[in-house]
């Protein structure tokens, strides 16, 4: 399955054809993805407690993976994902513009992006207070 969580995808068939959305959930076993704002179904929710109210809830139902295409962030086109090796890791690449689709390897030329380490905390030392004796000695000289 070439579609991953948080990818932007374009629906290519069905009632929602042409809509773009972010992938909210994936199920590789079933071959389905849930896309934000696409394939919305209404479900009746029954009140289970005395203080709850029954209501009709809109939920996003999963779509088959074959009905969506990944959208490249760089060129904004729906693409078929190409796999290539970058720094010894197999990554997803756009065949049209060559941009890396995996966020961890989206740096320059597909190199891995290094996380900034937090700066070390340095204790500021209190300034030594000048005593009356040292200041008097300095003035005498």
Image: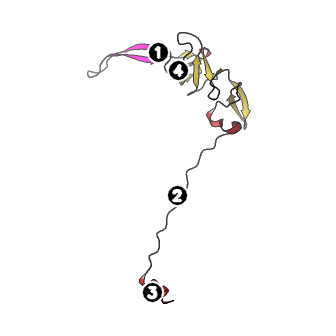
The residue where tag 2 is placed is 121
The residue where tag 4 is placed is 35
| Magenta extent | 37-60
- Pick whichever, 25 or 125, lies toward us: 125
Quarter holding the N terminus? top right
Reading the chain from its start, which is encountered first: label 2 or label 1? 1
Q: Could you give the CA–CA distance between mark 3 and mark 1, rounded to whole angstroms?
A: 84 Å
Badge 1: how crowded within 10 Å, few (<14), some, or many (20+)?
some
- Pick whichever, 77 or 41, lies toward us: 77
Reading the chain from its start, which is encountered first: label 3 or label 2? 2
Badge 2: how crowded within 10 Å, few (<14), some, or many (20+)?
few
Q: Residue at x 42, y 13 (%)?
A: 42
Residue placed farthest to the bottom in the image? Answer: 140
Reading the chain from its start, which is encountered first: label 3 or label 1? 1
Q: Is residue 107 magenta?
A: no
Element type where label 4 sits in the image:
strand
Badge 4: how crowded within 10 Å, few (<14), some, or many (20+)?
many
The residue where tag 3 is placed is 136
């Amino acid at each position: 399955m070439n579609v991953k969580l948080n990818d932007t995808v374009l629906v290519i068939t069905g009632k929602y054809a042409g809509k773009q959305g972010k992938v909210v959930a994936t199920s590789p076993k079933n071959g389905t993805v849930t896309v934000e704002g696409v394939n919305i179904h209404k479900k009746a929710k029954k009140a289970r407690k005395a203080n709850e109210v029954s209501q009709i809830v809109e939920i996003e139902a999963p779509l088959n993976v074959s009905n969506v295409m990944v959208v490249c962030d760089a060129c904004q086109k729906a693409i078929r994902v190409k796999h290539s090796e970058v720094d010894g890791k197999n990554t997803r690449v756009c065949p049209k513009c060559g941009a890396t689709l995996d966020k961890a390897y989206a740096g320059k030329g597909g190199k891995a992006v290094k996380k900034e380490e937090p700066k070390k905390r340095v204790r500021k030392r209190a300034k030594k207070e000048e005593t009356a004796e040292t200041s008097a000695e300095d003035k005498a000289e």
